[in-house]
């Protein structure tokens, strides 16, 4: 059974929980004017949308190998703090490190798609807010 859709559902539920937390935290039901409610709804959809979208972009950037050099350097420093036998067992060149890291394909598209879907109502609510 393919459970590829599960990550989409989990990301959407995390976004929905963030929206509910913002709405209840800011007192949505206590607001009196429609303009205030539209502003708060727009903010509530914007925050999880941007967080998910930027997390997906960050994972994509990491997947391209942008931070490989820093990761390799930290790993070498960590290995130098251990015993000589540990260092011999964990000896790896930068080319081997990049090859090993590029073999792992971390999914990121679900974060970008769900974040984009949360941004659509945020934009629509912002437009509605400006015209009310």
Image (cartoon, grey):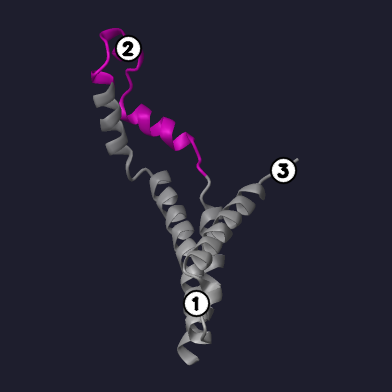
| Badge 1 element | helix
> Residue placed at 30% from the left, 32% from the top?
72
Q: Is residue 23 depicted above or below 124 in this figure?
A: above
The residue stretch that appears in magenta: 79-106
User: What numbered label is drawn on residue 2?
Assistant: 3
| Badge 2 element | helix
Residue 39 percent location from the top left of the image = 47, 79
In the figure, is residue 125 to the left or right of 75? right
Q: Nearer the viewer, residue 117 or 24?
A: 24
Estimate the spatial distance between the alpha carbons at disc 3 and disc 1, rounded to whole Å: 33 Å
Q: Quadrant of residue 109?
A: bottom right
- What residue would you read off at disc 2? 86
Residue 3 percent location from the top left of the image = 69, 44
> Residue placed at 32% from the left, 12% from the top?
86
Q: Is residue 55 depicted above or below 78 in this figure?
A: below
- Neighbours of disc 2 within 10 Å: few (<14), some (14-19), many (20+): few
Q: Please name which of the two marks, 2 or 1, marks the residue nearer to the observer.
A: 1
Q: Mark 3–mark 2 contact, CB under 8 Å?
A: no
Q: Is residue 89 depicted above or below 107 in this figure?
A: above
Q: Earlier in the sequence, mark 3 or mark 2?
A: 3
Q: Mark 3–mark 1 contact, CB under 8 Å?
A: no
> Residue placed at 49% from the left, 36% from the top?
104
Is 95 within the magenta?
A: yes
- What residue would you read off at disc 1? 123
Toward the right, the furthest residue is: 1
User: What numbered label is drawn on residue 132?
Assistant: none
Q: Quadrant of residue 98?
A: top left
């Amino acid at each position: 059974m393919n459970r590829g859709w599960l990550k989409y559902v989990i990301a959407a539920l995390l976004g929905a929980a963030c929206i509910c937390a913002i709405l209840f935290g800011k007192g949505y039901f206590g607001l009196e004017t429609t303009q205030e409610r539209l502003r708060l709804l727009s903010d509530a959809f914007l925050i999880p949308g941007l967080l998910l979208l930027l997390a997906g972009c960050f994972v994509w950037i990491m997947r391209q190998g942008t931070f490989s050099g820093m990761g390799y350097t930290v790993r070498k420093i960590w290995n130098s703090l251990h015993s000589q036998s540990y260092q011999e067992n964990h000896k790896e060149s930068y080319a081997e490190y990049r090859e090993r890291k590029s073999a792992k394909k971390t999914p990121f598209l679900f974060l970008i798609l769900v974040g984009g879907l949360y941004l659509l109502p945020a934009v629509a609510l912002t437009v509605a807010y400006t015209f009310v």
